[in-house]
Amino acid sequence: MAASDSQRANVVALPGDDPGPLRKIGRRLAVALGLIVFVAVVTYIGRDGYVDPEGDGVSLLDAFYYSTVTITTTGYGDVRPVSDEARLVTTLLVTPARVLFLILLVGTTLEILAERSRHAYRVGRWRKRLRDHTIVCGYGTKGQSAVHLLRSKGTEAERIVVIDESPAARNRATADGLAAVAGNASSQEVLAEAGIAAARSVIVAVDGDDSAILITLTARELNPRAAIVAAVREEENVHLLHQSGASGVITSSAAAGRLLGLCSETPQVTELLEDLLTVGEGIDIVEREVGPEEAGPVPATLSEGVVLGIVRDGELLRFGDPAAAELRPRDRLIELQSRPRTSEAESRR
C-alpha cells in the first residue's frame, strides 16, 4: 500500500527542523508548572487576605489548590481573596498568569496540530527541487569523510542526501546542513524517498560488505545512469560490487594495509599520499575540460599540472597509453595540481 504524504514526510529530516513535539510540550509544560508555582507563592505570601470555607487560614496546600483551580479557570470559589490587597494582587499578577497559561495551552495545541502539515509542506518543496544530487548511504566515519570532500570540492549541501538507520547519525547529518532519510538504504522505498531516480551519484559507505552489495544492486536497478561508488572491507568482494553495478569500488582494509606497509618502507611516499587526501592545499587530483589551445600532442606537464590520464567518451586512458598521446577538444584531463600549503600557524587561526 502506498504511503501517504504525511507518512512519507516523517522519514525525512531537513536541516533546521524544529525540535520534536514532545520536546516542545515538555518545555511549555515546565512554563505552565512555573506559573502555577508562582501564583501559589504569591497567594501564600498574602495568605492573610484570603479565606477558605472553614475559616482556619490558608495553608501552603490551600495556596497550591487555589493556584491550580484559578489558573486553569476552574474557579470553585472556596478559597478566595477577601482583602483589598489580595484582590489587587489577583488583578495585577494572578489574572495575567491565568491568561498566559491559556495562551500556552491553546498555542501548544494548535502548533502540534500544524507541525506535521508544515513539515510535510517543507519536504514536498524539497523533493521538487531535488535534482542531480548525491546520495550517501551511511553517515559514519566513511560517509562523513566523503561528504567533507564533496563540500570541499564545491558541492552544495542542498545537493547531498544522507540515508541512515541511526537517529544519531541523522542528527549529525542535519546539523551539518544535509537532508537525512531514515531507513535501510537497500530498500527501494527508502531510496525513492532520497530521490534515487534523479540522483547524479550514490556513495555506499555502510559497514557490511553484504549490505553494500545489496544497496548497489537496488540503486543500480532504480537508476541505471547514476555513478555508484562503494567501499568494502574484503578484496574478494570487489568483483561482486562491480557485477552489482558499481562504477568504482574502494577496498578499505586492503588500502589501509598497503598504506601501512608503504609507510614503513617509504614514509615520504606516504606523506605525499596524505597530501593528496587533503583537499584544497598541497597536491590535488583534479579533472577538467581540455582547453581549445591544448588540443594536440600531450606534453608530460601542462600549464596547470602533471597529466595522469584522459577521459575520452566515458573511458579512462591512463598516462602512457598510446591512445592518450594526443588531446582532443572534448576530452577531459585528470592531472596533479599543486596548491599553496597552509602553514601550521595559519591553520590554527
Image (cartoon, helix red, strand yellow):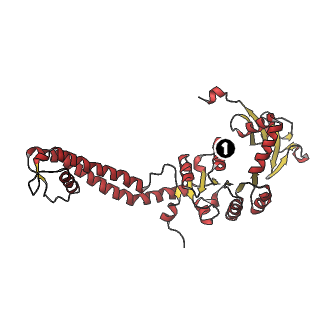
Residue 238 at x, y = what percent? Answer: 78, 57
Q: Quadrant of the N terminus?
A: bottom right
Q: Which residue type carries mark 1?
A: Leu
- The picture quadrant where one finds residue 89 is top left
Q: Residue 310, relative to residue 194: is it above or below?
A: above
Tell me which residue sits at (75%, 40%) in the image: 285
Tell me residue 183's x, y (percent): 58, 61
The tally of labels here is 1
| Callout 1 secondary element | helix
Q: Is residue 267 above or below residue 143?
A: above
Residue 209 appears left or right of 102: right
- Identify the residue position indicated by label 1 in the image: 149
In this rendering, the answer to whether 6 lies above or below 157 is below
Q: Of all residues shown, which one is farthest toward the top?
A: 345
Q: Residues within 10 Å of mark 1 (few under 14, many from 20)?
A: some
Outermost right residue: 322
Residue at 34 percent across and 59 percent down: it is 109
| Lateral position of residue 305 relative to residue 164, left or right | right
Quadrant position of residue 127: bottom right
Q: Tell me where residue 116 appears, x and y as whole percent.
A: 43, 60
Locate the C terminus by quadrant. Answer: top right
Coordinates of residue 194 in the picture (x, y in percent): 59, 58
Q: Nearer the viewer, residue 246 or 234?
A: 234
Q: Does the image show residue 198? A: yes
Residue at figure coordinates x 70%, y 59% from the top left: 212
- Residue 294, can we see it? no
Q: Is residue 61 left or right of residue 329?
A: left
Q: Residue at x 14, y 47 (%)?
A: 47
Between 129 and 22, the one lying in front of the other is 22
